[in-house]
Image (cartoon, rainbow, N blue to C red):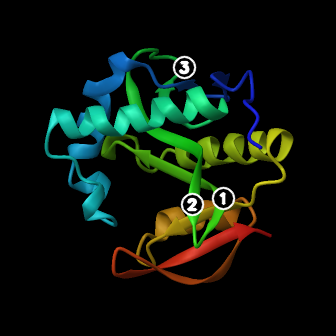
Amino acid sequence: MTHRIQGLEHLTTDRLLLRAFRESDVDEVFTLHSDAESNRFLASAQLHSKEAAHELLSLWLSDWAKHGVGYWMVERREQPGVAVGVGGIRHKQLEGRTVLNLAYRLSPHAHGAGYATEIARMALEMARQHIPEVPLVAIIHPENTASIRVAERLGLKLEREIPLEGVSNRLYVVG
């Protein structure tokens, strides 16, 4: 039985605002997910229309409505309303079991600032506090060295390789 968590819709880190998505975020979702650089390691995630962005946003909104947890819109604290990425955890089916998928995707102009680590650290903490019974994983393309460093910095361990859309990816789990 799934219970809905309360209180994860608006969180802050030292430098970031993490908030649940809103219907009005479709332009930001499209901008981030239509950028080829942001989708270098998973080309199938690249969006080519606003309709596709709306479908993705609808999925994320349903995560929040059903579970009270999902990916966050990420903004800088000093620039509220200006999106720099998406990140957090969401329920996902993996090999017949429910897991929490840890993700962080930032606009290219926000790369290298440590934001992914900040997002992932908060997501891990929220998962441990509120959903410890669901395993947390990160599925990372083997050439995505920046994401691998974030996962390893936070203590995730490489469990094995798994196929994702015909490409071998690394499955990281909480160590």
Where residue 68 sits: x, y (%)?
Answer: 66, 29
Q: Nearer the viewer, mark 3 or mark 2?
A: 2
Lower sequence index among marks 3 and 2: 3
Eyeballing the image, is 104 above or below 27? below
**40 or 54, nearer to the observer:** 54
Instruction: Please state if 39 lies on the left or on the right of 169 as rendered.
Output: left
Percent x, y for residue 100?
65, 53
Marks 1 and 3 close (CB-CB < 8 Å):
no
Q: Residues within 10 Å of mark 2 (few under 14, many from 20)?
A: few
Residue 137 seen in render: yes
**Secondary structure type for disc 2:** strand
Name the quarter where the N terminus is drawn. top right
CB under 8 Å between discs 2 and 1: yes
Looking at numbered disc 1 in the image, what kind of residue is underneath it? Val
Location of mark 3 (residue)? 77
Would residue 72 be visible to someone looking at this image?
A: no
Q: Is 80 drawn above or below residue 138 in the view shown?
A: above
Name the residue at 45% across, 78% down: 142
Image location (x, y in percent) of residue 105: 43, 48
Write down the residue under mark 1: 99
Q: Closest to the observer: 103 or 81?
A: 103
Mark 3 to mark 2 CA distance (whole Å) = 33 Å
For this rendering, which residue is in front, 175 or 16?
175
Q: Amino acid at mark 2?
A: Gln
- Mark number for residue 78? none
Residue 93, labelled with which disc? 2
Marks 2 and 1, how far apart at CA: 6 Å
Q: Of label 1 and label 3, which has the lower sequence position?
A: 3
Q: Quadrant of residue 28?
A: top left
Q: Quadrant of residue 157?
A: bottom right
